[in-house]
Amino acid sequence: MAVQQNKKSRSRKGMRRSHDRVATPTVIYCSCGEPTVPHSVCPNCGAYKGRQVIAKTEAE
């Protein structure tokens, strides 16, 4: 089992953990105004890059 030789200071511990944060997701807005994830079809209107990819009916 690994045992540390010296105590790590708060500063050094913080520097090591600086990249462990959870990244905030990138959000873009579709032409219909709904926020979506980039490089994916809009779940609201079914459009991708300005083209209608999935046919949505008015009932849905």
Image (cartoon, rainbow, N blue to C red):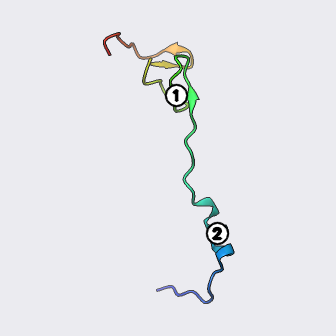
The amino acid type of the residue labelled 2 equals Gly
Residue placed at 63% from the left, 81% from the top? 8
Q: Residue at x 45, y 16 (%)?
A: 53
Q: CA distance from mark 1 to mark 2?
A: 34 Å
Say which amino acid is labelled 1. Answer: Pro
In the displayed orientation, state which residue is furthest to the top: 58
Above/below status of 18 relative to 24: below
Q: Which residue carries the number 1 mark? A: 35
Residue 37 picture location, percent across and down: 52, 33
Mark 2: give few (<14), some (14-19) or many (20+) Cα within 10 Å. Answer: few
Q: Quadrant of the image for the C terminus?
A: top left
In this rendered view, identify the residue nearer to me: 9 or 19.
9
Per the image, label 1 sits on a secondary structure element best described as strand
Numbered disc total: 2
The percent position of residue 48, horizontal first and vertical second, equals: 52, 20
**On the rendered structure, is 7 left or right of 1?**
right
Circle 1: is it few (<14), some (14-19), or many (20+) Cα within 10 Å? some
Label number found at residue 14: 2
Label 2 SS: helix
Residue ID at (39%, 13%): 55
**Residue at left 56%, top 19%?**
49
Q: Quick check: 9 above or below 6?
A: above
Of 47 and 7, nearer the camera is 7
Tell me whether circle 1 and circle 2 mark residues in contact (CB < 8 Å). Answer: no
